[in-house]
Image (cartoon, rainbow, N blue to C red):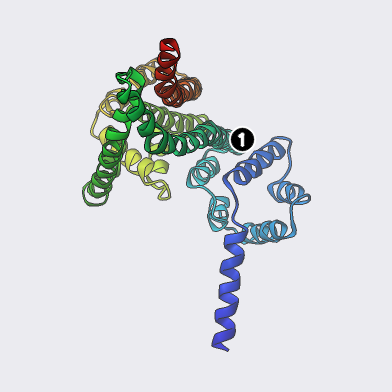
Amino acid sequence: MDILKCRNMIGWCTTMRRHKWTLNEQANFLKQLGELLSRGYPIAEAIVSISLPLPNYRKEELEDCLVKLKKGLPFHDVLEGLGFNKDLIGYVYFAEQHGSFAEALQEGSSLTLLKDRDMKKLFKLLQYPIVLLSITGFLFIFVEHTLLPRFTDLFKSLGLKENFFTKVIYAFDQYFPTAIELLLVFICIAAIYYFFVFRKFSILMQRAMLVRIPIIGKILKLLFNHYFSIQLSFLLSGGISISEALFLFEHNKRQLFYSQLGKEIKLKLAGGERLESIVASYSIFEAEFPMVIKHGQDNGRLEQELLFFSRRCLTKMETLIEKSFKLLQPILYLFIGFIVVSMYLAILLPMFHLLDAI
């Protein structure tokens, strides 16, 4: 009997691993759900409608979701049981509090699809250069260890000096292994720092350190600003006060960063500090965020100002990612091209000198 139970458990675990929802599937599911809800569908009918074209194992999972929803389980807990992304669950959690459920689902799914698209774009961007680098590496080893020494000996016997490109190839062969060793040492030091130092800092301190990293830190900062401002905007639009909104942030235990952030801001507000002054004290927020809050409070449209600010953060983030991609690709290709041209010219230029002598 115990053996049978173990087999069933192993089979269940295998099925769960095989049927795990990809990030793209999660985002598309919530996007379609948000669209149907905005058209007036009840959530149960919307889920049934979405499940119709899906495979049988997905239908079974969604049927189980409906059973849990009928028992009164919150939708964000149901999604957690399916292994959904924490950020998506966070969107659903906040949506259940402020009432703009359909809009929040579409907002969260759109951002997730954007992140997924950018990751795929980065992979495609690096895929071709990595293949080129691998081929260039094999060619470099062959030329540097087989062809070039023989030609160098021949040219020296004929009294020809090494040209610039020959020196480049030998210098690259001399210093590249050292560069790899230094990179490995840096990775080891970074791993030791992460496990023994970085993880001991508070979650807010960790994020404050991450946003200082060039380019990546800027993207993370914009992402944090977008998420915080859009959720606060939705909550305020639902008639919730700032203190109540921060209370909901604090009790979102699935996202510890935003939970701790909400707790600290709420305590400082209770101590008499102004919201824009509190926000200005955190390095994780954009410099314009406190001004946006002050302007919104002055004109009585804070939720709208936060919404516009979140849209600007998203636009800035997309622009920065696009610029980074456009900068990275030419640099890789220039490096590969320079190495390949150097290998050919290191051999061909002395041969041209020989031909001229003849």
Figure check: 127 above or below 322:
below
SS class, disc 1: helix
- Please tell me in which quadrant of the rendered image residue 189 appears: top left
Crowding near the residue tagged with mark 1, few <14, some 14–19, many ≥20 C-alpha atoms within 10 Å: many
At x 40% / y 14%, what residue is drawn? 353
Residue 162 image offset from top left, x and y in percent? 31, 21
Residue 237 image offset from top left, x and y in percent? 52, 29
At x 53% / y 36%, what residue is drawn? 127
- Please tell me in which quadrant of the rendered image residue 358 appears: top left
Residue 307: in sight, yes or no?
no
Q: Nearer the viewer, residue 140 or 103?
A: 140
Q: Nearer the viewer, residue 124 or 208?
A: 124
Residue type at numbered disc 1: Gln
Farthest left residue in view = 197
Farthest top residue in view = 356
| Quarter of the image that includes the N terminus | bottom right
Farthest bottom residue in view = 1
Figure check: 20 above or below 287:
below
- Please tell me in which quadrant of the rendered image residue 203 appears: top left
Residue 123 image offset from top left, x and y in percent? 52, 36
Residue 15 image offset from top left, x and y in percent? 62, 65
Q: What residue sits right under mark 1 in the picture?
A: 106
At x 24% / y 30%, what residue is drawn? 272
Mark count: 1
Figure check: 27 above or below 151:
below
Q: Nearer the viewer, residue 118 or 349?
A: 349
Figure check: 12 above or below 210:
below
In the image: residue 213, left or right of residue 136: left
Residue 8: in sight, yes or no?
yes
